[in-house]
Image: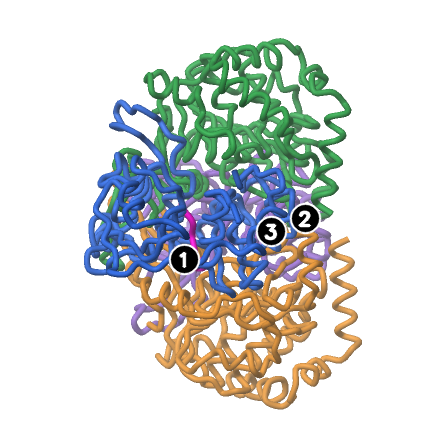
Chain colours: A purple, B blue, C green, D orange
Amino acid sequence: MTYTASELLAVSAARLLEDRKIVFAGVGTPLLASVLAQTTHAPNLTIVLEGGVIGPEMAPGRLPISTNEMRAARRGVLLPSITQIFLYAQRGFYDYGFLGGAQVDPYGNVNTSFIGPPERPRVRLPGSGGACDIISHCREILIVTTHERRRFVERVDFVTSPGHVDGPDGRRRAGLLFGRVTKVVTNLALMGFDPATARMRLEALQPGVRLEEVREHTGFELPAPADVPHLPPPAERELAILRTLDPERTFLG
Amino acid sequence: MTYTASELLAVSAARLLEDRKIVFAGVGTPLLASVLAQTTHAPNLTIVLEGGVIGPEMAPGRLPISTNEMRAARRGVLLPSITQIFLYAQRGFYDYGFLGGAQVDPYGNVNTSFIGPPERPRVRLPGSGGACDIISHCREILIVTTHERRRFVERVDFVTSPGHVDGPDGRRRAGLLFGRVTKVVTNLALMGFDPATARMRLEALQPGVRLEEVREHTGFELPAPADVPHLPPPAERELAILRTLDPERTFLG
Amino acid sequence: MSDASFVEARRRLEAKDRSRRDKRMPVERAAELVRDGDHIAIGGCLYSRTPWVTLRELLRQRRRDLTLSRNLLCYEGELFMVAGAARGIVTSWAGIGLPWGLSRIVREFVESGRVRFDEWSHLALGLRYRAAAMGVPFLPTLSMLGSDLLARAGARTMTCPFTGERLCLVPALFPDVALLHVHRADPFGNAQIDGYPHMDADLAVAAAAVIVSAEEIVDPEDLRRHADRTIIPFFAVDAVVEAPYGAYPHECYGLYEADLAHIDAYARGVASGGADAARRHLDDYVYGPETFEAYLERFGVGRLLERRRAAQELSR
Amino acid sequence: MSDASFVEARRRLEAKDRSRRDKRMPVERAAELVRDGDHIAIGGCLYSRTPWVTLRELLRQRRRDLTLSRNLLCYEGELFMVAGAARGIVTSWAGIGLPWGLSRIVREFVESGRVRFDEWSHLALGLRYRAAAMGVPFLPTLSMLGSDLLARAGARTMTCPFTGERLCLVPALFPDVALLHVHRADPFGNAQIDGYPHMDADLAVAAAAVIVSAEEIVDPEDLRRHADRTIIPFFAVDAVVEAPYGAYPHECYGLYEADLAHIDAYARGVASGGADAARRHLDDYVYGPETFEAYLERFGVGRLLERRRAAQELSR
């Protein structure tokens, strides 16, 4: 069975979502993963979208491109203002939040603002959007991204979205009293964080991936258990669901 | 022509309201005055009620008893939450606010909380309601009340609603950067405030009232101009309108 | 103060079951969410959308040591005092309504020190709920500056780092339980309100637990058709109680006007008879009728329908 | 910063004519409320309810040195940069949409220093508008703590007097003019929005002046029938512009879906042709068509109706 990196990410992320929880999702992989989870093991997972919708149900083939468009609101039960939808996050209602990013560091800090120095950036990226808010307020944050060495760097050029900041007590000292980054899902591996250091560590490898491969594509030291397990590959059913959801492969690549 | 104190208050207050302005009114005299103004000289005066309604139009004979009931919302164009209706005030949208009170002092501070010491009050009054907010945020505040010596005291037992606080700079020092108490309307007189001292002073007498009478009913020194004018008495048409509005005399006494 | 601290309030919300599930239950069970000593926030305002069905049940279950908060407290406050159920109130105003003057019972219980009365300005109390709903420990306001409420209420002041001027900070108020009466809710607790929203949407999100009583329980499909009218999200709600006329004798916007004759009779009774009159009222309307239907029977079908007609006339 | 200070913002609001009066006018006149150098807040979000009818007119009138703020800035930002109309943007995100990747034009203008990009988190920017709407100089939040946005954006921190913990304070943002596109408004400016409210209600109250364009101008009686749906009060509004399809080619909830093919063509054009492609787009859609009707003609009736059908299908 073949699958794209995006398909693999969506499947791996979906499996992390428990039933009866509330997930704050962006468009693309997070939304695909959430709908996949609903369709498989988590029928009572509630999706919340940044554009201002609670409990939407996606129509296969008509996935939204932004969280602010009509398609994203389909069959939602509540359409709060955008500020309100984030305030529910700040109040503590959401179990999961998703993040991607141009750069991620070992503490799970994410950069979507600048490559190079902010005063004279080599690349001005689009910016935080809701990412900084999601990472600050949701209970468990999942970072989902493709695994590249230029992306997994020891120090991000700019902290758009604070993960563990600089250590186990980093968030707390910054004033972030709630929530934390728990997992990093890539096309090569599943990673978590060492509670003692708050640094990223390997938990499992994607199917067919070797430990050296992951380390080769990671710009910082990545501790791993003695015997790294492999994640089970995407099931046929999971891939079929994803492909029905996004038949034009806008997000599946 | 005879009229009650309440009728006189409503008429006198109504005449102070300019057309095309926005008045934040409570039920009773303030609402009567506002509707009277609309019916006479201020057809484009907009009424806002604390319960959460903008632009209501009252049905004669069905005046609301509270600003939070259906009758108060009649023909309103907007029904914001109560917090929102006050936030519009804090933002600066309302031209006039009305206040009554159990005690008023020469600086226009109003007490609706305690008679006697707050720790062991002789009378626990109902409390601020919106009064403290109205006096803090509306551009011009009109105090409307019956004129009694026990009510007009040199020092209120408790400042529920700050007028000029303790002098010309009192509000500013307290942090109240906007709005001010401009007039005090009673059944005996119309009063304003001396800009130099921020203390109350007489501006005009109600029809048939003598200066000594006012002073007799005032518990503090009340400066007056050399030749105090008299306010014109309520016109027949004004009284007729009020009596049509409140035929059961719930508020007209 | 039974108010939860900021961090504790968040932890409680995180720990509770926020899942989408059928939450319909009889009011008797819903009321068990309230424990002795809790801080109860009451939705609606004065005699509008008061959650009588749930308040009545709390009195019947003889809850004790409650603190009641509400922006304008009507005579439900008096009944809780007389019943020995309330040890404190947090409000901007306590009475019945303008024409009825001072509340003899509030005076009696507060002046004697038996019940604590924490007074905030109307906006300040609204902002306390809103701060909680927003998940922040306080909100700034210009209200209460220059007043004696400021120090007494437990607000703080700061010098604004942006303007250099003085500001009042009101602390978030996280009630243990909010009681809300709405026009319609689905079984999960998504709810819509017609007419005045009052402060209900903030209460729903501020409280650790929420009991929603609804004139009508509807299919989620019905709410979806007007999702932009839903103002209470299911994940804030813990119990959904079906209760037509659940606010009676207070009003429910568009559905029935308040029974002012009844309120007037109560107020006159208390004005002359004091706490004893309120005790009789408790016997007649709270302890006596075993069910909410039996309670409504005390008013009679004719009165309920007449109040409905009056409301329809007004909303036309 | 062209942002008005707190005190100045209040004074401006007090000084302006807030009366209930007929404010209908052609977009050409409404656009004159915007002066060179103003801070313009744009309603809607990304490609939803963008006030294109007014934005187009500002470009046609060759306004200069504007600062544009919007929670998520779509390619209207690019057009203002290329046209030389914008000197700065205040946003949480600037692009077109996920599938189109980085904006070549934003990169070009911002990296070269020609346009200033003030970045805030999405909630932080929402709270800046809300602080202004609430009439306070700031709001507290936990957002942006621990991030590099905090210092760079001009937020401040404080130790919370209630919790003793660190908090972020975001300053109120008072735009000079807010541009909002809504479903219906009456001649006075009372307005209703269907579906997503986005941040429009806050913008309307935060700004010193407000231009509302509406799919439909309705009789105030029509609004009164559903007064609980009105979210913009007339006293905040200065101009009301009738503009069916006024957000096109962006969507207007329930009425028409975004013209994604058009957006895609624009994005591809710019991806390969850069600012020149955007300039051609300006000629074709902004400077060329003399009226908004003429502009809509460029898309054609068939396309407009097809997008309307798609929307109806979705809201069913």
Q: Judge the density around disc 1: few (<14), some (14-19), many (≥20) Cα neighbours within 10 Å.
A: some
- Label 1: element kind: loop
The circle on residue B240 is 3
Q: Name the residue rendered at 47%, 15% in the picture.
A: C274
Q: Quadrant of residue B232?
A: bottom left
The circle on residue A239 is 2
Alpha-carbon span between mark 3 and mark 2: 79 Å
Q: Nearer the viewer, residue C246 or D98?
A: C246
Circles 1 and 3, Cβ within 8 Å, touching? The answer is no
The residue range painted magenta reads: B91-99
Residue type pointed to by label 2: Leu
Residue C266 point in image, percent of width and height:
57, 21
The circle on residue B231 is 1
Residue type pointed to by label 1: Leu
Q: Of discs 1 and 2, which sits in the foreground?
A: 1
Q: Is residue A199 visible?
A: yes
Report the chain holding disc 2: A
> Does the magenta segment cover residue A125?
no
Residue type pointed to by label 3: Ala
Q: Taking A114 as reference, is A173 left or right? A: left
Alpha-carbon span between mark 1 and mark 3: 19 Å
- Label 2: element kind: helix
Q: Is residue D60 above or below residue B171?
A: below
